[in-house]
Amino acid sequence: AAKDQGRNRFSYFTPSLQTAALARLRMTNDLRVAIAEQHLQVYFQPIVDLHTGRIQKAEALVRWRHAQLGFISPMEFIPIAETSGLILAIGDLVFRESVKWVKQWRQDYHPDFQVSVNQSPMEFQGDQERYVNWIQYLADQNLPGQAIIVEITEGLLLDASHKITSKLLQFRDAGIQVALDDFGTGYSSLSYLKKFDIDYLKIDQSFIRNLAPDSSDIALSEAIIMMAHKLGLKVVAEGVETTQQSQLLEQAACDFAQGYLFAKPLPPEEFELLLQQQKASAS
Ligand code: C2E
Ligand code: MG
Ligand code: MG
Ligand code: MG
């Protein structure tokens, strides 16, 4: 019976595995073409200072509009970009686009404006030379490192290799800040917060979703915020969708918030309209 089952499983899985492998292969090829033909776009989502209500930063989020399939979620193509190595080209183009816009927004709206870019583990663990080039690119554009924040995930810090530490030092020396993305979803070993030089914790949206007075999630968020502040880190809440969530976070002394309540990720020209409105209402 076990043999039969094994055989059944084999014949059942083979075609779907093949289909999945073909789909991945096709997506990898399409992605390579999309990069070459500049079909990837960078959107920007506001990060709001909860004390002032003003947009202080933006997160750069990559978008792929496939000619036949329409928008494909980064959740789908980033993993494929990682395994194929295409993530490096994507990361470079997101970085350059972010630099272009942060330069303009610092000039026209806010001298301290920052854009935050995501780095997936494969990118961050790669060649140190790549970030030397980034830092040089910023200097060529007459921008300080402070214009850029790099978002990494907790998992990276678990294997506390020399490579990771030296990259974090490389960023710190250049003035580039570092944020820990999706905080709370990984192993959340708190010891590395003391050990590594991290500037921001981004509380994952899974904690924000069910925020309510007296809920366990608000208790957790308050504890994270308090701990972060004691260690000298600022906190960004992700996925804020309601005014109640925003108010609870403000009461908990959270520093920044990001989410659909303020705006969805937007093309740069639309994002800039928000900065224009803000400027108009302040004067
Ligand atoms: P992330 O870095 O945690 O980005 C936040 C995600 O939450 C974004 O999804 C954003 O659109 C979404 N979001 C923001 N506010 C809300 C809200 O109020 N409600 C809900 N339900 N969602 C909200 P997105 O753009 O689909 O990106 C998904 C993930 O893909 C990102 O998660 C990040 O890990 C990755 N990613 C996106 N762009 C890049 C990139 O340029 N490079 C790398 N390496 N990864 C990227
Ligand atoms: Mg992020
Ligand atoms: Mg996140
Ligand atoms: Mg620091």
Image: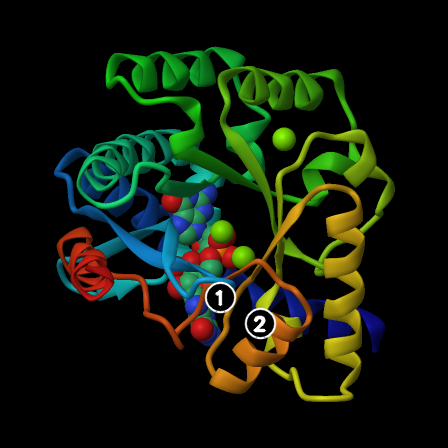
Q: Position of residue 172 (x, y in %)?
A: 58, 21
Residue 185, above or below 165:
below
Q: Which mark is residue 30?
A: none
Q: Position of residue 186 (x, y in %)?
A: 73, 55
Query: Where on the picture, by quarter, is residue 281?
Result: bottom left
**Residue at position x 25%, y 54% from top?**
64
| Camera-nearest label, 1 or 2 | 1
The three-letter amino acid code for the residue at tag 2 is Tyr
Q: Nearer the viewer, residue 268 or 276?
A: 276
**Residue at position x 58%, y 58% from top?**
255
Q: Is residue 212 left or right of residue 52?
A: right
**Residue at position x 37%, y 60% from top?**
54
Q: Would you say the residues marked 1 and 2 are in contact, meaning their CB atoms lie under 8 Å apart?
A: yes
Residue matched to label 1:
16
Q: Is residue 76 left or right of residue 267?
A: right
The three-letter amino acid code for the residue at tag 1 is Ser
The image shows a total of numbered marks equal to 2
Residue matched to label 2:
12
Q: Nearer the viewer, residue 96 or 236?
A: 236
Q: Quadrant for ligand 1?
A: bottom left
Quarter placement of the C terminus: bottom left
Q: Nearer the viewer, residue 32 or 165?
A: 165
